[in-house]
Image (spheres, rainbow, N blue to C red):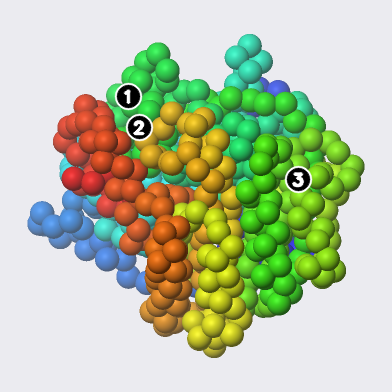
Amino acid sequence: MSPTFPHEEHPNQTHLALQSPDQTIQPTMLSPSTVRFSIVWTTLLAVIACSPHPCLDTRAGLGPCNKAGAACQALKRKLGSEITAPGDGQYAALATENWSQTAWNTPSCIATPANSTSVQTIIRTLVSLDVPFAIRSGGHSPNPGYANIDTGVLVSLSALNQVSYDVSQNAVHVSPGARWGPVYRYLQPLNITVVGGRVLEVGVGGLTLGGGLSYYTDLYGLAADNILSYQVVLADGRIVAANKSSHTNLFWALKGGSNNFGIVTRFTLAAYPLTQVWGGIKLYPSSAMPAVLEAYHAYHTAPNKDLNANLHINLVPTNDTIGVTLIYLKPVTSPPAAFAPFSSNKLGPPLLDQTGPSSLVDLLAIFNSGTVPRWEWSVSSLMPSPELWADVNDILSPTSPEIVALQKLQAGTLVSTVQPITSRVAEIGNNPLGLKPINQTWLSINAGWWREEDDEAARGVVKTLHERLENAARKRGRLLEYIFMNDAGEGQAVIAGYGKENVKRLQAVRREYDPRLVFARLVPGGQKVPE
């Protein structure tokens, strides 16, 4: 039995090539769930491929379609097969590679750069013609327009998927189009790992530039805190290395700065030793939610917390289950003491217990992408309290009117993910996020559904549940300003929540590295530095 949760990006490729000097990752066969989903997609892709494209009319004029078409033609002359146009064989698949159908668009063309030099060419061409564009690493966000575009050029970084280990620096070089699964599989035989994503199919670029929550976060901070250097193509086409000794302000700004400052073409990450872990998933019925949240609170507020212990909880009221994912980052053979609250008799026997010794890759592979094609997210930062968890139990109960309404939609699914953050995370990070050094929980609400005509209803459910949750937290004085970018919804102003001083500094960095506001004007998607 494989649990399905929304923080699982749907792999739309049969494999991801991973280039390194001494190792090649073999292609991975499609999973049965992917095969089932592809049957549905075949029809959808055919419709997209045969539909008239909004920018195919290239008659004389200076409208946005004409400019985008001119840019695509110029890029085709310069980069050849790295540019895919509507009508080309791979166009439909590339345009719909984003995990959620809510993020599908019909770009004027798709640029798939093979290297940083190609990225330079793309940026210089688009800037010179003043053409909008989107940037996609793994395309995991369901937010419309964040990593795709209609009238403009989609820059897909999927071909920049290299990974290598530098023994002399104990550092790992990873390109932004790589997925965490192949990265971890490359590092596993070397008995090392990096602070990265918790879902194998998620892309490296978007997660890292948004902060990046990891099972290693209590020990080493967020993924962004563990970047040693960024290779960045700037708005003027220059390539720079941003690190502790060069372009230091840019180095700071990229640690949660999203796509506001350039296109990162390589991340250099700190490496850490890893052999085996202990962990897995326990499933409980939704009736155990009060006991599960009580156990979570005891775990999260324990003094002298064991930093090797981590977890997250998925509350899934639409199928009457709760998934508790536990992970301990040492090779033990029995449940560590840190997880003792989850052995309480109050929880009752789990419906499923898949915990035990494992490799990190095998543990993460428990989860699958599922087949629900459309998603909407929101996230809140809360200070834990027993009274607030009682509110959460009421708001996310299977009998809640919003949950009942969602279940009436085809494939209506609600998953709320409870993610513990310790005060140490703020103390470790030298980043612009503005985290307070207190224990907090990042709680996301994620709705999935099948049909486009149900978009408004499903998004209304997320909006109402999010408002109810934040109102309850605000009433109890437990709501924090910070919004975790990687789980944020389209309408959530993440960077404004970093704090006034950090926003001012980000604005200054933007003036220094992008004085013409290229990434503010021409890249409409993603979280933006406030004006």
Q: Nearer the viewer, residue 313 or 348?
A: 348
Circle 3: is it few (<14), some (14-19), or many (20+) Cα within 10 Å? some
Q: Residue at x 27, y 62 (%)?
A: 56
The answer to whether the residue labelled 2 contacts the one labelled 1, judged by CB atoms less than 8 Å apart, is yes
Identify residue type, mark 2.
Answer: Ala
Mark 2–mark 3 Cα distance, whole angstroms, equals 35 Å
Does label 2 or label 3 sit earlier along the sequence? 2
Q: Residue at x 55, y 35 (%)?
A: 424
Regarding mark 3 in the picture, which secondary structure is present there?
helix
Does label 1 or label 3 sit earlier along the sequence? 1
Identify residue type, mark 3.
Answer: Ala
**Of the residues tagged 2 and 3, which is closer to the observer?**
3
Mark 2–mark 1 Cα distance, whole angstroms, equals 6 Å
Residue to which mark 2 is pinned: 253
Circle 1: is it few (<14), some (14-19), or many (20+) Cα within 10 Å? some
Identify residue type, mark 1.
Answer: Asn
